[in-house]
Amino acid sequence: MPDVTLTAGSAAAISLSPGDALSVRAIVAGQVAELVAHSAADPRERLSTLLTGLAEEAHTLREGMTLWSQEYRPLLRVEELTNDEHDLALEACTPWLGRALGAELVGDCCWTSFRAWLEGEGLPEKWVPYPVGIFKRADERDGRYGLRPGSSRPGDLVRFSAASACTVLVSACPLTRGAADPAAPVIEVTWNEQNS
Amino acid sequence: MRQDVLLEPRSYTASEVEVGESLRITVVDGQQVPDIVLWAREDAGERLSPTASQLLNGSHLMVPGCVLYSHRASGLARVDACTAGAGVIVGGSCSAPLNYARFGIPDTPNCRSNLLAAGAPYGVEEADVQHIYCPFMTIRRDDDGSYVIDLPEAEPGDYVELAALVDLVVLTSNCPQERTPTNAFNPSRLHLWVGPSDASRPTLDAIVAEAAHA
Ligand SMILES: [Zn+2]
Ligand SMILES: [Zn+2]
């Protein structure tokens, strides 16, 4: 079963066939992972958190939920989760946003990693999707809306299955980090081929 | 006055708003939501970022005084007024696939198609019309994880006004959604005005009188 561990500010791209499983697991508490998915047939068709949220009437991930593309074709399903606090509204973190928020960033922002993959597909940055913010939390406290530490406890995971052929990108977010040490592994991504 | 246009139900328009100018959208008949896309005219990469706008203002909703920020965290426009409801800012609009997902009806009128048509002279593609400011719209995120659209609060005469911080291109869709509470199940008219920030604005009476003569 292949797996990869990510440090904050690094990302992995995994090609999935229908039925394949992919798990994203937090190694440390408070770490956020951002996940996007592009259809293998045309990378401009991508997981839409807006369509998914409205079609599934949910603002977080739920077990059994389908994650749809902007054209309402199924890309992934949520098979299992140990934590139900995730985000389906925010954009991927960018260096500009990180700097404006005064954050100490390490490695690449999630947006930068997603854009780099798209460039390899010959597509410009505007096609970077809104990610599923795994363990990501933002809310209003003391009258101010802001990002909070990730909801993850060590070992918390979300397991997806592929509903159609797609490439999934997972980035260990450098903006909402669970470890002070930039060399510490913070997210583990595991995948396997269920149907083969 | 640079633009003064009545937006019939389900229609759309494109506007250019320069520094020193404002854009006002007025609710004519009541309970109607516009879907707005904007970017810096000189650099389409400086496009509206809902997330940067929320996090840099420290506000989930774009209330008066909030700045609409770009993807690169620079200010594009300031919300000078929004006389009804909240200022929702989200990553997408109603679309034919979304309406099919929710209602099982194909090819319905929708904001995505409207915004693509409004932006055709600028060569926009689907990815260019996914960052949306929806004044007057009401969305609830319930504690049980559900995501619910409610009736908008806007009454005839309510308006939203943006001041340009850089020269802007603005696309506006008069949301055609008729199967959710977004527009109270009854798409109706909006009025859009662009002009110098210090100019007098048309009143609702003048807008209605002008519409009657059109
Ligand atoms: Zn991130
Ligand atoms: Zn709409």
Image: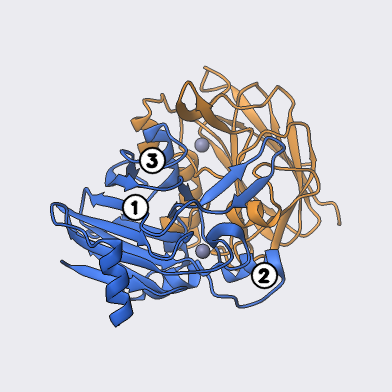
Chain colours: A orange, B blue
Q: Which residue is mark 3?
A: B63
The residue under the point 52% across, 42% down is A90
Point out which mark residue B169 bears. none
Residue ID for mark 1: B160
In the image, farthest residue toward the right: A195
Read off the chain for label 1.
B
Residue B42 image offset from top left, x and y in percent:
22, 59
Circle number at residue B100: 2
Is residue B123 placed above or below B157 in the rendered structure?
below
Rate crowding at label 3 as few (under 14), some (14 to 19) or many (20 or more) other CA atoms within 10 Å.
Answer: many
Using the rendered image of the protein, determine whether residue A2 is visible from the camera's viewpoint: no
Question: Looking at numbered disc 1 in the image, what kind of residue is underneath it?
Answer: Val
- Do dots 1 and 2 share one subunit? yes
The C terminus of chain A: image quadrant: bottom right
Chain containing mark 2:
B
Residue A92 rendering spot, x and y as whole percentages: 49, 43
x, y percent for residue B140: 60, 44
Query: For mark 2, does the 10 Å Cα neighbourhood hold few (<14), some (14 to 19), or many (20 or more) residues?
Result: some
